[in-house]
Image (spheres, grey):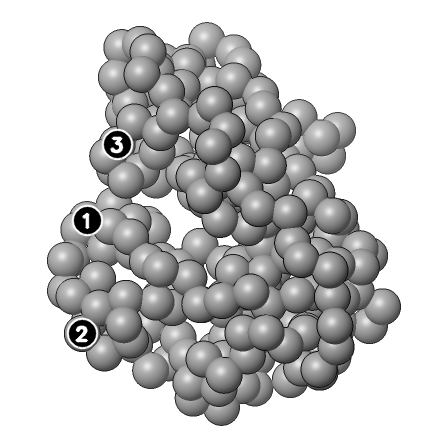
């Protein structure tokens, strides 16, 4: 088993960037979801503003977050965001843990992705995709530990999936059969909610293994805590 793909999403609910190397911190992939889009009623996501997935978020060599190649806080990005998320939408910087839906790392496997009729794993928005994993082996991993070199990752549970999986990551066209299949065949859950227990740097091609170990409980994020972070 090895690290097949690495992904970072500099802006929540926008298209992400593929990496060859990722720094894993106790706050997930360094630079992940540090910007989000906010409206008058709270945080706006692709669950209700599908067009947000059509905007590409990347990180410049100097660390600046770009939206469709322009600075995230500049006029071009502001106009692009309003066009897909509404006239009151704006990008803001935010580093609180609740910017993640559940935990700060999502892990998927090539074997499980191959089991889906719609095999584009980018619909799942994983941070890490593991290769050479047989079939649905990942479904037996919650409660265990993923180790990649010196990096230790706790596996909490299978991720409950939402409407975003129905959106093609390139065209943003919707296919509701994707989510129907996940609910019908996989109890509505796919890929793994994880957290970084021991930080470090990982690279595409690194060897990975599943082990048994006791880890401290993860710091929760997202909507499962009563934080002042309303999603519209």
**In-front residue for pair 217/59:** 217
* Image quadrant where residue 19 sits: bottom right
Q: Where is residue 6 shown, x and y percent of the image?
A: 61, 59
**In-front residue for pair 216/117:** 216
Report whether 106 appears left or right of 190.
Answer: right
Camera-near label (2 vs 3) is 2
Q: Which residue is mark 3?
A: 49
Residue 19 appears in the picture as rendered? no
Residue reaching furthest to the bottom = 134
Residue at position x 33%, y 11% from top? Answer: 40
Residue at position x 60%, y 30% from top? Answer: 96
Mark 3 or mark 1: whose residue is earlier in sequence? 3
Q: Which residue is mark 1?
A: 173
Q: Residues within 10 Å of mark 2 (few under 14, many from 20)?
A: few
Camera-near label (3 vs 1) is 3
Give the spatial CA distance, label 2 vs label 1.
21 Å
Camera-near label (2 vs 1) is 2
């Amino acid at each position: 088993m090895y690290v097949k793909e690495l992904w970072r999403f500099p802006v929540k609910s926008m298209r992400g960037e593929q990496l060859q190397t990722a720094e894993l911190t106790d706050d997930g992939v360094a630079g992940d979801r540090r910007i989000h889009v906010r409206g008058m009623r709270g945080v706006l996501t692709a669950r209700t503003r599908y067009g947000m997935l059509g905007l590409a978020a990347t990180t410049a060599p100097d660390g600046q977050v770009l939206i469709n190649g322009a600075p995230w806080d500049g006029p071009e990005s502001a106009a692009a965001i309003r066009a897909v998320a509404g006239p009151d939408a704006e990008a803001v910087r935010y580093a609180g843990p609740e910017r993640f839906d559940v935990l700060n790392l999502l892990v998927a496997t090539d074997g499980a992705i191959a089991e889906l009729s719609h095999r584009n794993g980018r619909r799942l928005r994983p941070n890490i995709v593991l290769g050479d994993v047989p079939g649905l082996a990942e479904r037996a991993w919650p409660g265990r530990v993923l180790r990649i070199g010196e990096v230790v990752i706790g596996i909490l549970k299978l991720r409950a999936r939402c409407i975003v999986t129905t959106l093609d990551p390139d065209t943003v066209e919707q296919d509701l059969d994707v989510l129907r299949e996940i609910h019908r065949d996989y109890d509505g859950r796919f890929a793994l909610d994880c957290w970084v227990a021991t930080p470090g740097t990982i690279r595409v091609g690194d060897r990975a293994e599943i082990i048994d170990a006791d880890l401290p409980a993860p710091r929760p994020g997202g909507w499962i805590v009563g934080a002042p972070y309303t999603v519209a």
